Amino acid sequence: MAKIWTLVEHRNGAIDSISWETLAMARQLADKSGGSVTAVILGDGVGDFAQTAFHYGADDAIVVDDPSLKDYRLETYSATLTALAQEHQPDVFLLGASDKGREIAPAVAAKLGVGLASDVLSLDMDGDKLVATRPVLVGNLVATITFGDAKPQMASLRRRVFPALEPDTARNGNVTQANVAGITPVTEVVGFEAAEGEVSLNDASIIVSGGRGVGGPEGFPTVKALADVLGGALGASRAAVDAGWIPYKHQVGQTGKTVQPDLYIACGISGAIQHLAGMKTSKVIVAINKDPEAPIFKYAKYGIVGDLFKYVPALTEAFKAELGK
Amino acid sequence: MKAIVLMKQTPDTAQLSASMDGLKLMAEGGPRIVNPWDEYAIETGITLAEDHGGEAVILTMGKPEATEAIKTGLAMGCKGATLLTDDAFENSDSLATARILTAAINQMGDYDIILAGKSAIDGDTAQTAVQVAALLGVPYLGYVAKIEAVDFDAKTITVVRAIDGGRETVTSPLPAVVSVLKEIGEPRYPSFMGIRKAAKAKIPEMGLADLGLSADEVGAAGSQAQWLQVTLPPAQESTLEVIEGEPEEAAKILVQKLLAEKVI
Protein backbone atom coordinates (compact mmCIF):
# COMPACT_ATOMS: atom_id res chain seq x y z
CA MET A 1 0.00 0.00 0.00
CA ALA A 2 2.40 2.62 -1.19
CA LYS A 3 1.66 6.20 -0.13
CA ILE A 4 2.68 8.28 -3.10
CA TRP A 5 3.03 12.05 -2.90
CA THR A 6 3.29 14.56 -5.70
CA LEU A 7 3.98 18.29 -5.50
CA VAL A 8 1.58 20.62 -7.32
CA GLU A 9 3.61 23.48 -8.75
CA HIS A 10 2.23 26.81 -9.76
CA ARG A 11 3.32 30.24 -10.87
CA ASN A 12 1.31 33.48 -10.83
CA GLY A 13 -1.87 31.66 -9.84
CA ALA A 14 -1.65 29.12 -12.68
CA ILE A 15 -0.79 25.48 -12.14
CA ASP A 16 2.29 24.30 -14.03
CA SER A 17 1.24 21.45 -16.36
CA ILE A 18 4.26 19.44 -15.20
CA SER A 19 2.25 18.84 -12.00
CA TRP A 20 -0.39 16.86 -13.91
CA GLU A 21 2.25 14.91 -15.83
CA THR A 22 3.80 13.92 -12.48
CA LEU A 23 0.40 13.15 -10.98
CA ALA A 24 -0.47 10.84 -13.88
CA MET A 25 2.67 8.79 -13.25
CA ALA A 26 1.92 8.70 -9.51
CA ARG A 27 -1.59 7.43 -10.32
CA GLN A 28 -0.14 4.67 -12.48
CA LEU A 29 2.28 3.56 -9.74
CA ALA A 30 -0.46 3.68 -7.12
CA ASP A 31 -2.84 1.60 -9.24
CA LYS A 32 -0.12 -0.97 -9.82
CA SER A 33 0.85 -1.24 -6.15
CA GLY A 34 -2.61 -0.76 -4.63
CA GLY A 35 -1.53 2.54 -3.13
CA SER A 36 -2.84 6.09 -2.90
CA VAL A 37 -1.87 9.44 -4.40
CA THR A 38 -1.67 12.58 -2.31
CA ALA A 39 -1.28 15.97 -3.99
CA VAL A 40 0.78 18.34 -1.84
CA ILE A 41 -0.02 21.99 -2.47
CA LEU A 42 1.95 24.91 -0.99
CA GLY A 43 1.21 28.58 -1.57
CA ASP A 44 -0.93 31.57 -0.73
CA GLY A 45 -4.58 31.33 -1.81
CA VAL A 46 -4.17 27.90 -3.37
CA GLY A 47 -7.07 26.08 -1.69
CA ASP A 48 -8.93 25.65 -5.01
CA PHE A 49 -6.04 23.75 -6.54
CA ALA A 50 -6.89 20.62 -4.51
CA GLN A 51 -10.15 20.07 -6.41
CA THR A 52 -8.31 20.31 -9.73
CA ALA A 53 -5.72 17.85 -8.44
CA PHE A 54 -8.51 15.34 -7.71
CA HIS A 55 -9.74 15.75 -11.29
CA TYR A 56 -6.26 14.91 -12.55
CA GLY A 57 -5.95 11.75 -10.47
CA ALA A 58 -5.16 12.54 -6.82
CA ASP A 59 -7.01 10.65 -4.05
CA ASP A 60 -6.47 13.30 -1.41
CA ALA A 61 -4.56 16.50 -0.84
CA ILE A 62 -2.45 18.20 1.80
CA VAL A 63 -2.75 21.97 1.51
CA VAL A 64 -0.48 24.48 3.21
CA ASP A 65 -2.06 27.86 2.50
CA ASP A 66 -0.07 30.64 4.07
CA PRO A 67 0.84 34.23 3.13
CA SER A 68 4.50 33.45 3.84
CA LEU A 69 4.43 31.03 0.88
CA LYS A 70 3.38 33.70 -1.62
CA ASP A 71 6.86 34.06 -3.10
CA TYR A 72 8.52 30.73 -3.75
CA ARG A 73 11.54 30.44 -1.48
CA LEU A 74 13.57 27.27 -1.43
CA GLU A 75 14.11 27.40 2.33
CA THR A 76 10.42 27.70 3.28
CA TYR A 77 9.22 25.20 0.68
CA SER A 78 11.87 22.60 1.48
CA ALA A 79 11.49 22.99 5.26
CA THR A 80 7.70 22.67 5.05
CA LEU A 81 7.85 19.64 2.76
CA THR A 82 10.49 18.03 4.97
CA ALA A 83 8.33 18.49 8.07
CA LEU A 84 5.25 17.13 6.27
CA ALA A 85 7.15 14.07 5.07
CA GLN A 86 8.49 13.41 8.56
CA GLU A 87 4.96 13.58 9.95
CA HIS A 88 3.11 11.56 7.28
CA GLN A 89 5.86 9.15 6.14
CA PRO A 90 5.11 8.78 2.43
CA ASP A 91 6.78 5.88 0.59
CA VAL A 92 7.35 7.74 -2.66
CA PHE A 93 7.55 11.47 -3.36
CA LEU A 94 7.47 12.66 -6.97
CA LEU A 95 8.09 16.19 -8.23
CA GLY A 96 8.34 17.73 -11.69
CA ALA A 97 11.89 18.31 -12.91
CA SER A 98 11.19 22.01 -13.35
CA ASP A 99 13.65 24.65 -12.21
CA LYS A 100 11.91 24.60 -8.82
CA GLY A 101 11.54 20.83 -8.60
CA ARG A 102 15.20 20.31 -9.39
CA GLU A 103 16.23 22.36 -6.33
CA ILE A 104 13.39 21.47 -3.94
CA ALA A 105 13.84 17.70 -4.40
CA PRO A 106 17.57 17.55 -3.55
CA ALA A 107 17.12 19.90 -0.58
CA VAL A 108 14.32 17.77 0.87
CA ALA A 109 16.17 14.51 0.10
CA ALA A 110 19.26 15.84 1.91
CA LYS A 111 17.28 16.82 5.00
CA LEU A 112 15.46 13.48 5.09
CA GLY A 113 18.57 11.46 4.19
CA VAL A 114 16.79 9.66 1.34
CA GLY A 115 17.59 8.74 -2.26
CA LEU A 116 16.66 10.88 -5.25
CA ALA A 117 16.66 10.36 -9.01
CA SER A 118 16.42 13.66 -10.91
CA ASP A 119 15.03 14.31 -14.38
CA VAL A 120 13.72 10.77 -14.83
CA LEU A 121 12.47 9.37 -18.13
CA SER A 122 10.61 6.33 -16.78
CA LEU A 123 9.44 5.01 -13.42
CA ASP A 124 8.21 1.68 -12.15
CA MET A 125 7.70 -0.13 -8.85
CA ASP A 126 9.44 -3.43 -8.16
CA GLY A 127 7.68 -4.61 -5.01
CA ASP A 128 7.89 -1.58 -2.75
CA LYS A 129 11.02 -0.25 -4.46
CA LEU A 130 10.99 2.51 -7.02
CA VAL A 131 13.01 1.92 -10.18
CA ALA A 132 13.83 4.94 -12.34
CA THR A 133 15.70 5.55 -15.56
CA ARG A 134 17.36 8.87 -16.22
CA PRO A 135 19.73 10.39 -18.76
CA VAL A 136 23.41 10.69 -17.90
CA LEU A 137 26.39 12.00 -19.86
CA VAL A 138 24.07 14.63 -21.38
CA GLY A 139 21.70 12.10 -22.86
CA ASN A 140 24.36 9.83 -24.32
CA LEU A 141 23.61 7.14 -21.72
CA VAL A 142 20.63 6.03 -19.66
CA ALA A 143 21.14 4.95 -16.04
CA THR A 144 18.73 2.74 -14.12
CA ILE A 145 18.43 3.91 -10.52
CA THR A 146 17.36 1.75 -7.60
CA PHE A 147 16.73 2.85 -4.06
CA GLY A 148 17.75 1.80 -0.55
CA ASP A 149 15.38 1.32 2.38
CA ALA A 150 15.00 4.98 3.36
CA LYS A 151 11.58 6.47 2.63
CA PRO A 152 10.34 8.40 0.79
CA GLN A 153 12.06 7.31 -2.39
CA MET A 154 12.19 10.52 -4.40
CA ALA A 155 12.22 11.36 -8.09
CA SER A 156 11.75 14.41 -10.27
CA LEU A 157 10.16 13.76 -13.66
CA ARG A 158 11.31 15.29 -16.92
CA ARG A 159 8.83 17.68 -18.49
CA ARG A 160 6.81 16.55 -21.53
CA VAL A 161 7.68 12.86 -21.12
CA PHE A 162 4.72 11.61 -19.03
CA PRO A 163 1.30 12.41 -20.50
CA ALA A 164 -1.22 13.96 -18.09
CA LEU A 165 -4.59 12.25 -17.54
CA GLU A 166 -7.76 13.74 -18.99
CA PRO A 167 -9.41 15.58 -16.08
CA ASP A 168 -12.35 13.69 -14.60
CA THR A 169 -14.60 16.25 -12.88
CA ALA A 170 -16.51 13.47 -11.09
CA ARG A 171 -13.46 12.66 -8.98
CA ASN A 172 -13.25 14.03 -5.45
CA GLY A 173 -11.12 13.62 -2.35
CA ASN A 174 -10.26 14.72 1.18
CA VAL A 175 -8.28 17.83 1.91
CA THR A 176 -6.00 18.04 4.94
CA GLN A 177 -4.89 21.52 5.95
CA ALA A 178 -1.36 21.74 7.31
CA ASN A 179 0.93 24.45 8.65
CA VAL A 180 3.99 26.04 7.21
CA ALA A 181 7.28 25.10 8.91
CA GLY A 182 8.16 27.70 11.50
CA ILE A 183 11.28 29.09 9.91
CA THR A 184 12.17 32.61 8.94
CA PRO A 185 13.39 32.79 5.36
CA VAL A 186 16.72 34.58 5.12
CA THR A 187 16.64 35.22 1.39
CA GLU A 188 14.34 37.84 -0.08
CA VAL A 189 12.94 38.28 -3.57
CA VAL A 190 13.48 41.95 -4.42
CA GLY A 191 12.50 41.91 -8.07
CA PHE A 192 11.04 39.84 -10.86
CA GLU A 193 11.19 40.52 -14.54
CA ALA A 194 8.71 38.26 -16.34
CA ALA A 195 9.71 36.94 -19.76
CA GLU A 196 6.54 38.25 -21.34
CA GLY A 197 5.43 37.68 -24.88
CA GLU A 198 8.02 35.00 -25.27
CA VAL A 199 7.57 31.24 -25.38
CA SER A 200 10.13 29.62 -23.11
CA LEU A 201 12.24 26.73 -24.37
CA ASN A 202 11.22 24.63 -21.36
CA ASP A 203 7.51 24.80 -22.10
CA ALA A 204 7.54 24.88 -25.90
CA SER A 205 5.98 22.11 -27.97
CA ILE A 206 7.61 23.62 -31.05
CA ILE A 207 11.14 25.04 -31.21
CA VAL A 208 12.80 26.69 -34.20
CA SER A 209 16.56 27.10 -33.75
CA GLY A 210 19.32 28.84 -35.62
CA GLY A 211 23.01 28.07 -35.73
CA ARG A 212 26.21 29.19 -37.39
CA GLY A 213 24.47 29.12 -40.78
CA VAL A 214 22.30 32.04 -39.71
CA GLY A 215 25.41 34.12 -40.33
CA GLY A 216 24.88 36.93 -37.82
CA PRO A 217 22.40 38.68 -35.54
CA GLU A 218 20.64 40.10 -38.59
CA GLY A 219 19.76 36.55 -39.67
CA PHE A 220 17.80 35.61 -36.56
CA PRO A 221 14.58 37.53 -37.37
CA THR A 222 14.12 35.10 -40.29
CA VAL A 223 14.29 32.15 -37.88
CA LYS A 224 12.12 33.90 -35.28
CA ALA A 225 9.42 34.66 -37.86
CA LEU A 226 8.96 30.93 -38.37
CA ALA A 227 8.90 30.29 -34.62
CA ASP A 228 6.31 33.04 -34.18
CA VAL A 229 3.94 31.78 -36.84
CA LEU A 230 4.06 28.34 -35.19
CA GLY A 231 3.64 29.76 -31.68
CA GLY A 232 6.97 28.16 -30.87
CA ALA A 233 10.10 29.15 -28.99
CA LEU A 234 13.31 30.45 -30.52
CA GLY A 235 16.40 28.33 -29.94
CA ALA A 236 20.05 28.60 -30.90
CA SER A 237 23.23 26.59 -31.03
CA ARG A 238 26.21 27.39 -28.86
CA ALA A 239 28.07 28.71 -31.92
CA ALA A 240 25.43 31.41 -32.46
CA VAL A 241 25.31 32.30 -28.76
CA ASP A 242 29.09 32.46 -28.35
CA ALA A 243 29.32 34.67 -31.44
CA GLY A 244 27.02 37.10 -29.63
CA TRP A 245 24.25 36.85 -32.23
CA ILE A 246 21.55 35.89 -29.74
CA PRO A 247 21.29 35.84 -25.91
CA TYR A 248 22.32 32.79 -23.92
CA LYS A 249 18.78 32.04 -22.72
CA HIS A 250 18.09 30.65 -26.20
CA GLN A 251 20.94 28.13 -26.14
CA VAL A 252 20.00 24.49 -26.59
CA GLY A 253 22.57 21.82 -25.76
CA GLN A 254 25.20 20.71 -23.29
CA THR A 255 25.76 24.06 -21.58
CA GLY A 256 22.28 25.36 -22.39
CA LYS A 257 18.79 23.90 -22.14
CA THR A 258 17.78 20.30 -22.74
CA VAL A 259 14.49 20.26 -24.62
CA GLN A 260 12.06 17.68 -25.86
CA PRO A 261 9.48 19.40 -28.08
CA ASP A 262 7.08 17.70 -30.50
CA LEU A 263 8.75 19.55 -33.37
CA TYR A 264 12.31 20.87 -33.58
CA ILE A 265 13.31 22.78 -36.69
CA ALA A 266 17.09 23.25 -36.93
CA CYS A 267 18.08 26.04 -39.33
CA GLY A 268 21.74 26.27 -40.28
CA ILE A 269 22.77 23.99 -37.41
CA SER A 270 25.36 21.36 -38.27
CA GLY A 271 24.57 19.19 -35.25
CA ALA A 272 27.63 19.14 -32.99
CA ILE A 273 27.36 16.41 -30.36
CA GLN A 274 26.88 19.03 -27.65
CA HIS A 275 23.87 20.48 -29.48
CA LEU A 276 22.40 17.07 -30.26
CA ALA A 277 22.59 16.24 -26.55
CA GLY A 278 20.06 18.97 -25.89
CA MET A 279 17.47 18.17 -28.55
CA LYS A 280 17.87 14.77 -30.17
CA THR A 281 14.93 13.23 -28.28
CA SER A 282 12.53 15.72 -29.88
CA LYS A 283 9.60 13.88 -31.46
CA VAL A 284 10.09 15.17 -35.01
CA ILE A 285 13.28 16.91 -36.12
CA VAL A 286 13.47 18.97 -39.30
CA ALA A 287 16.88 20.10 -40.54
CA ILE A 288 17.52 22.84 -43.06
CA ASN A 289 21.18 23.08 -43.98
CA LYS A 290 23.33 23.82 -47.00
CA ASP A 291 25.68 20.96 -46.22
CA PRO A 292 24.17 17.55 -47.07
CA GLU A 293 26.86 15.92 -44.87
CA ALA A 294 25.85 17.85 -41.71
CA PRO A 295 25.44 15.39 -38.78
CA ILE A 296 22.05 16.91 -37.91
CA PHE A 297 20.55 15.04 -40.90
CA LYS A 298 21.29 11.72 -39.17
CA TYR A 299 18.75 12.65 -36.49
CA ALA A 300 16.25 14.46 -38.69
CA LYS A 301 13.07 12.94 -40.01
CA TYR A 302 12.72 15.59 -42.71
CA GLY A 303 15.56 17.46 -44.32
CA ILE A 304 15.99 20.26 -46.79
CA VAL A 305 19.42 20.74 -48.33
CA GLY A 306 19.59 24.38 -49.26
CA ASP A 307 19.91 28.02 -48.25
CA LEU A 308 17.93 28.65 -45.07
CA PHE A 309 17.31 32.26 -46.15
CA LYS A 310 15.30 30.93 -49.10
CA TYR A 311 13.60 27.95 -47.47
CA VAL A 312 12.77 29.31 -43.99
CA PRO A 313 10.80 32.34 -45.28
CA ALA A 314 9.00 30.03 -47.74
CA LEU A 315 8.07 27.76 -44.83
CA THR A 316 6.87 30.74 -42.78
CA GLU A 317 4.63 31.84 -45.66
CA ALA A 318 3.34 28.31 -46.25
CA PHE A 319 2.44 27.91 -42.57
CA LYS A 320 0.79 31.34 -42.52
CA ALA A 321 -1.39 30.31 -45.46
CA GLU A 322 -2.16 26.90 -43.95
CA LEU A 323 -2.87 28.11 -40.41
CA GLY A 324 -4.83 31.14 -41.62
CA LYS A 325 -2.58 33.69 -39.95
CA MET B 1 37.19 37.03 0.80
CA LYS B 2 37.40 33.31 0.44
CA ALA B 3 35.47 31.46 -2.25
CA ILE B 4 35.32 27.67 -2.35
CA VAL B 5 34.67 26.37 -5.85
CA LEU B 6 33.16 22.88 -6.05
CA MET B 7 34.65 21.26 -9.14
CA LYS B 8 34.34 17.84 -10.69
CA GLN B 9 36.46 16.17 -13.33
CA THR B 10 34.34 14.64 -16.10
CA PRO B 11 34.78 12.82 -19.39
CA ASP B 12 34.94 15.06 -22.45
CA THR B 13 31.82 14.58 -24.58
CA ALA B 14 33.67 16.17 -27.51
CA GLN B 15 35.39 12.79 -27.87
CA LEU B 16 32.15 10.96 -28.59
CA SER B 17 32.17 9.48 -32.05
CA ALA B 18 31.06 6.42 -34.00
CA SER B 19 33.89 4.44 -32.43
CA MET B 20 33.59 6.02 -28.97
CA ASP B 21 30.11 5.64 -27.51
CA GLY B 22 29.02 6.84 -24.10
CA LEU B 23 29.85 3.59 -22.32
CA LYS B 24 33.37 3.53 -23.70
CA LEU B 25 33.86 7.19 -22.93
CA MET B 26 32.84 6.74 -19.29
CA ALA B 27 35.03 3.66 -18.86
CA GLU B 28 38.16 4.50 -20.77
CA GLY B 29 37.70 7.80 -22.64
CA GLY B 30 40.79 9.89 -23.23
CA PRO B 31 41.85 12.95 -21.26
CA ARG B 32 39.24 14.09 -18.77
CA ILE B 33 38.31 17.71 -18.34
CA VAL B 34 37.01 20.26 -15.89
CA ASN B 35 33.24 19.76 -15.95
CA PRO B 36 32.19 22.45 -18.48
CA TRP B 37 29.61 24.01 -16.16
CA ASP B 38 32.22 24.26 -13.37
CA GLU B 39 34.42 26.46 -15.54
CA TYR B 40 31.87 29.22 -14.99
CA ALA B 41 32.06 28.69 -11.21
CA ILE B 42 35.86 28.88 -11.35
CA GLU B 43 35.66 32.07 -13.41
CA THR B 44 33.22 33.59 -10.92
CA GLY B 45 35.49 32.74 -7.98
CA ILE B 46 38.57 34.23 -9.62
CA THR B 47 36.68 37.38 -10.64
CA LEU B 48 35.36 37.87 -7.09
CA ALA B 49 38.90 37.47 -5.72
CA GLU B 50 40.23 40.02 -8.20
CA ASP B 51 37.49 42.53 -7.45
CA HIS B 52 37.33 42.15 -3.68
CA GLY B 53 40.71 40.73 -2.65
CA GLY B 54 41.16 37.28 -1.19
CA GLU B 55 41.20 33.98 -3.00
CA ALA B 56 39.26 31.26 -4.72
CA VAL B 57 40.15 27.66 -3.85
CA ILE B 58 39.02 24.43 -5.47
CA LEU B 59 37.38 21.51 -3.69
CA THR B 60 37.09 18.30 -5.69
CA MET B 61 36.02 14.78 -4.85
CA GLY B 62 37.32 12.20 -7.27
CA LYS B 63 39.98 9.75 -8.21
CA PRO B 64 43.66 10.70 -7.96
CA GLU B 65 43.73 11.56 -11.69
CA ALA B 66 41.35 14.46 -10.94
CA THR B 67 44.51 16.43 -10.05
CA GLU B 68 44.81 17.10 -13.79
CA ALA B 69 41.51 19.01 -13.84
CA ILE B 70 42.44 20.75 -10.58
CA LYS B 71 45.64 21.98 -12.20
CA THR B 72 43.60 23.51 -15.00
CA GLY B 73 41.64 25.44 -12.36
CA LEU B 74 44.87 26.53 -10.65
CA ALA B 75 46.32 27.63 -13.99
CA MET B 76 43.21 29.76 -14.54
CA GLY B 77 43.88 31.55 -11.25
CA CYS B 78 42.59 29.62 -8.26
CA LYS B 79 45.02 29.87 -5.35
CA GLY B 80 44.70 26.44 -3.80
CA ALA B 81 42.90 23.15 -3.97
CA THR B 82 42.01 20.05 -2.00
CA LEU B 83 41.30 16.65 -3.51
CA LEU B 84 38.98 14.39 -1.55
CA THR B 85 39.90 10.90 -2.59
CA ASP B 86 39.46 7.48 -1.05
CA ASP B 87 38.45 4.07 -2.38
CA ALA B 88 35.58 4.24 0.12
CA PHE B 89 34.11 7.22 -1.80
CA GLU B 90 33.47 5.13 -4.94
CA ASN B 91 29.80 4.88 -5.94
CA SER B 92 28.70 7.70 -3.65
CA ASP B 93 25.32 9.13 -4.66
CA SER B 94 24.80 12.88 -4.63
CA LEU B 95 23.94 12.99 -0.93
CA ALA B 96 26.95 10.89 0.12
CA THR B 97 29.08 13.17 -2.08
CA ALA B 98 27.53 16.22 -0.41
CA ARG B 99 28.33 14.68 3.00
CA ILE B 100 31.99 14.27 1.98
CA LEU B 101 32.24 17.82 0.58
CA THR B 102 30.48 19.26 3.64
CA ALA B 103 32.85 17.48 6.03
CA ALA B 104 35.77 19.00 4.14
CA ILE B 105 34.22 22.50 4.04
CA ASN B 106 33.70 22.34 7.80
CA GLN B 107 37.46 21.83 8.19
CA MET B 108 38.42 24.65 5.86
CA GLY B 109 37.81 27.48 8.33
CA ASP B 110 35.93 30.66 7.45
CA TYR B 111 34.62 31.08 3.94
CA ASP B 112 32.32 33.63 2.32
CA ILE B 113 30.81 31.89 -0.65
CA ILE B 114 30.66 28.44 -2.20
CA LEU B 115 30.41 28.35 -5.98
CA ALA B 116 29.20 25.51 -8.16
CA GLY B 117 28.24 24.82 -11.76
CA LYS B 118 24.69 23.96 -12.78
CA SER B 119 25.36 20.23 -13.07
CA ALA B 120 28.10 17.77 -13.94
CA ILE B 121 27.85 16.50 -17.50
CA ASP B 122 28.51 12.88 -16.50
CA GLY B 123 26.10 12.24 -13.62
CA ASP B 124 23.83 15.11 -14.67
CA THR B 125 21.98 15.12 -11.34
CA ALA B 126 22.35 18.83 -10.48
CA GLN B 127 21.76 17.70 -6.89
CA THR B 128 25.09 17.90 -5.08
CA ALA B 129 25.42 21.67 -4.64
CA VAL B 130 21.86 22.00 -3.30
CA GLN B 131 22.55 19.18 -0.88
CA VAL B 132 25.81 20.75 0.32
CA ALA B 133 23.82 23.90 1.13
CA ALA B 134 21.16 21.86 2.91
CA LEU B 135 23.74 19.98 5.02
CA LEU B 136 25.68 23.15 5.85
CA GLY B 137 22.43 24.96 6.67
CA VAL B 138 23.28 27.92 4.44
CA PRO B 139 21.11 29.49 1.69
CA TYR B 140 21.23 28.06 -1.84
CA LEU B 141 20.94 30.32 -4.86
CA GLY B 142 20.55 28.38 -8.09
CA TYR B 143 20.43 29.33 -11.80
CA VAL B 144 22.44 32.47 -11.07
CA ALA B 145 23.03 34.47 -14.26
CA LYS B 146 24.49 37.56 -12.62
CA ILE B 147 25.90 38.79 -9.33
CA GLU B 148 24.27 42.17 -9.01
CA ALA B 149 25.97 43.25 -5.79
CA VAL B 150 28.10 41.65 -3.14
CA ASP B 151 29.36 43.04 0.15
CA PHE B 152 31.73 40.70 1.94
CA ASP B 153 31.95 43.01 4.99
CA ALA B 154 28.19 43.20 5.45
CA LYS B 155 27.97 39.55 4.33
CA THR B 156 25.20 40.00 1.77
CA ILE B 157 24.81 39.17 -1.89
CA THR B 158 22.22 40.10 -4.52
CA VAL B 159 21.91 37.86 -7.56
CA VAL B 160 19.73 37.47 -10.64
CA ARG B 161 18.31 33.98 -11.11
CA ALA B 162 17.27 32.99 -14.65
CA ILE B 163 14.35 30.67 -13.99
CA ASP B 164 11.21 29.34 -15.72
CA GLY B 165 9.13 32.39 -16.58
CA GLY B 166 11.63 35.17 -16.03
CA ARG B 167 14.48 36.64 -14.04
CA GLU B 168 14.27 36.90 -10.26
CA THR B 169 16.45 39.19 -8.20
CA VAL B 170 17.19 37.81 -4.73
CA THR B 171 19.21 39.01 -1.77
CA SER B 172 20.77 36.57 0.64
CA PRO B 173 23.10 36.60 3.59
CA LEU B 174 26.57 35.09 3.16
CA PRO B 175 27.93 32.52 3.30
CA ALA B 176 25.72 30.90 0.69
CA VAL B 177 26.05 28.26 -2.01
CA VAL B 178 25.72 29.92 -5.42
CA SER B 179 25.26 27.81 -8.54
CA VAL B 180 26.00 29.76 -11.71
CA LEU B 181 24.99 29.58 -15.37
CA LYS B 182 27.05 30.28 -18.44
CA GLU B 183 25.69 33.83 -18.57
CA ILE B 184 27.80 34.71 -15.52
CA GLY B 185 30.82 35.19 -17.79
CA GLU B 186 33.04 33.27 -20.19
CA PRO B 187 35.82 31.38 -18.42
CA ARG B 188 39.32 32.69 -19.03
CA TYR B 189 42.05 30.58 -20.57
CA PRO B 190 44.86 29.45 -18.28
CA SER B 191 47.85 31.76 -18.59
CA PHE B 192 51.27 30.43 -19.61
CA MET B 193 52.70 31.34 -16.22
CA GLY B 194 49.67 29.81 -14.56
CA ILE B 195 50.18 26.52 -16.37
CA ARG B 196 53.85 26.39 -15.37
CA LYS B 197 53.06 27.11 -11.74
CA ALA B 198 50.14 24.67 -11.63
CA ALA B 199 52.25 21.90 -13.16
CA LYS B 200 54.51 22.01 -10.09
CA ALA B 201 51.70 22.37 -7.56
CA LYS B 202 51.31 19.69 -4.95
CA ILE B 203 47.60 19.04 -4.38
CA PRO B 204 46.77 18.11 -0.79
CA GLU B 205 44.53 15.05 -0.47
CA MET B 206 42.07 14.06 2.22
CA GLY B 207 40.42 10.69 2.75
CA LEU B 208 37.75 9.13 4.88
CA ALA B 209 39.71 9.23 8.15
CA ASP B 210 40.88 12.83 7.62
CA LEU B 211 37.28 13.94 7.24
CA GLY B 212 36.11 12.13 10.35
CA LEU B 213 33.47 10.21 8.42
CA SER B 214 32.65 6.55 8.83
CA ALA B 215 32.57 4.07 5.96
CA ASP B 216 28.81 3.60 6.19
CA GLU B 217 28.20 7.32 5.51
CA VAL B 218 29.90 7.31 2.11
CA GLY B 219 30.23 5.25 -1.04
CA ALA B 220 27.66 2.61 -1.92
CA ALA B 221 27.07 1.87 1.80
CA GLY B 222 26.11 5.47 2.48
CA SER B 223 23.98 5.95 -0.64
CA GLN B 224 20.22 5.57 -0.93
CA ALA B 225 20.25 5.90 -4.72
CA GLN B 226 22.35 3.50 -6.78
CA TRP B 227 23.05 2.97 -10.47
CA LEU B 228 21.79 -0.54 -11.17
CA GLN B 229 23.00 -0.37 -14.73
CA VAL B 230 23.91 2.09 -17.41
CA THR B 231 23.13 1.50 -21.06
CA LEU B 232 23.18 3.27 -24.39
CA PRO B 233 19.91 5.07 -25.15
CA PRO B 234 17.55 3.24 -27.50
CA ALA B 235 18.74 3.67 -31.07
CA GLN B 236 16.83 6.41 -32.86
CA GLU B 237 15.27 5.68 -36.18
CA SER B 238 17.13 7.69 -38.75
CA THR B 239 14.82 7.50 -41.74
CA LEU B 240 15.60 10.87 -43.22
CA GLU B 241 13.24 12.00 -45.92
CA VAL B 242 14.83 14.74 -47.98
CA ILE B 243 12.30 17.23 -49.35
CA GLU B 244 13.41 18.36 -52.78
CA GLY B 245 12.28 21.27 -54.88
CA GLU B 246 12.32 25.04 -55.05
CA PRO B 247 11.60 26.84 -51.77
CA GLU B 248 7.89 27.44 -52.29
CA GLU B 249 7.21 23.92 -53.49
CA ALA B 250 9.35 22.23 -50.83
CA ALA B 251 7.74 24.36 -48.11
CA LYS B 252 4.24 23.27 -49.14
CA ILE B 253 5.25 19.60 -49.08
CA LEU B 254 6.94 19.92 -45.68
CA VAL B 255 3.95 21.73 -44.17
CA GLN B 256 1.63 18.90 -45.23
CA LYS B 257 4.05 16.28 -43.84
CA LEU B 258 4.24 18.08 -40.49
CA LEU B 259 0.47 18.51 -40.30
CA ALA B 260 0.14 14.77 -40.91
CA GLU B 261 2.63 14.15 -38.06
CA LYS B 262 0.23 16.05 -35.76
CA VAL B 263 3.04 18.10 -34.28
CA ILE B 264 1.65 21.51 -35.27
Image (spheres, grey):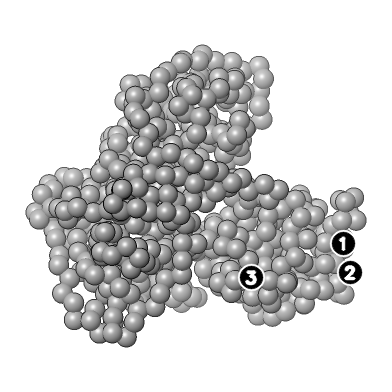
Relative height, residue A213 to residue A314 (above, below) = below
Where is residue B171? Give x, y as percent: 42, 44
Q: Position of residue B51 (x, y in %)?
A: 35, 65
Q: CA distance from mark 1 to mark 2?
A: 9 Å
Residue under numbered circle 1:
A317
Within 10 angstroms of label 3, few (less than 14), some, or many (20 or more) residues?
Answer: many
**Distance Cα–Cα, label 2 vs label 3:** 28 Å
Residue located beneath label 2 in the image: B248
Dot 3 amino acid type = Trp
Helix, strand, or loop for circle 3?
loop
Instruction: Residue B123: tell me if it is visible.
Output: no
Residue at 15 percent across and 74 percent down: it is B202
- Please report, as a chain letter, where disc 1 is located: A
Judging from the image, mark 3 belongs to the subunit labelled A
Task: Tell me the residue at 25%/64% (across/down).
Answer: B54
Discs 1, 2 touching: Cβ within 8 Å: yes
Q: Amino acid at mark 2?
A: Glu
Please state which of the two labelled residues, at mark 1 or mark 3, is closer to the viewer. Answer: 3
